[in-house]
Image (spheres, rainbow, N blue to C red):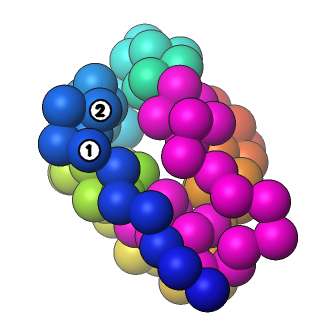
Amino acid sequence: MEIKAVPKETLSIIPKYDGEENLLNLFILKCEYVVNGSKATGNAAQDLYLFHVVSSKHTGGAATLLSDHPNIKSYEQLKDLHATFR
């Protein structure tokens, strides 16, 4: 399956996220905009790519949380993980 890269200008919309609870809603809102504009129904490779796009914006505590859950492999799972630890 073909992967459609997210343009740099669009990627810059997603801020770095360090796990600050009061910034989670903003982070998710920006991610939703980028992910929804780049999804391709039925394209598992694109889904995995978008997970890596979003997870690459994690730093500090958010990166540690993700590292502690190696079974997380999609943006939806990542979003659910953050909701669980609110």
**Relative height, residue 20 to residue 85 (above, below):** above
For the point 63% across and 36% down, the residue is: 36
Nearer-the-camera pick, 8 or 29: 8
Instruction: Evaluate if marks 2 and 1 touch, with contact meaning CB atoms under 8 Å apart.
Output: yes
Q: Is residue 54 magenta-colored?
A: no
Extreme residue in the right direction: 42
Residue drawn 53% across and 25% down?
Answer: 33
Please tell me whether mark 1 sits on a helix, a strand or a loop: loop
Q: Amino acid at mark 2?
A: Thr
Looking at the picture, how far across and down is residue 74, in whole percent? Answer: 64, 66
Cα distance in 3D space between marks 2 and 1: 5 Å
Front residue of 1 and 18: 1
The quarter of the picture where the N terminus appears is bottom right
Disc 1 crowd, CA 10 A, few/some/many (<14, 14-19, 20+):
few
- The residue that mark 2 highlights is 10
Q: Which residue corresponds to mark 1?
A: 7
**Above or below 32: residue 62:** below
Image spot of residue 14 (x, y percent): 31, 31
Q: Is residue 83 visible?
A: yes
User: Residue 56 sits in which quadrant?
Assistant: bottom left
Q: Main secondary structure of the magenta part?
A: helix
Indicate which disc residue 48 carries: none
Residue 43 highlighted magenta (yes or no)? yes
| Residue 57 vertical placement versus 36 (above, below) | below
- Quadrant occupied by the C terminus: top right
| Residue 13 appears left or right of 81 | left
| Tag 1: amino acid | Pro
The x and y percentages for residue 78 are 60, 55
Residue drawn at 44 percent across, 63 percent down: 4
Q: Secondary structure at mark 2?
A: helix
The magenta-colored residue range is: 31-52
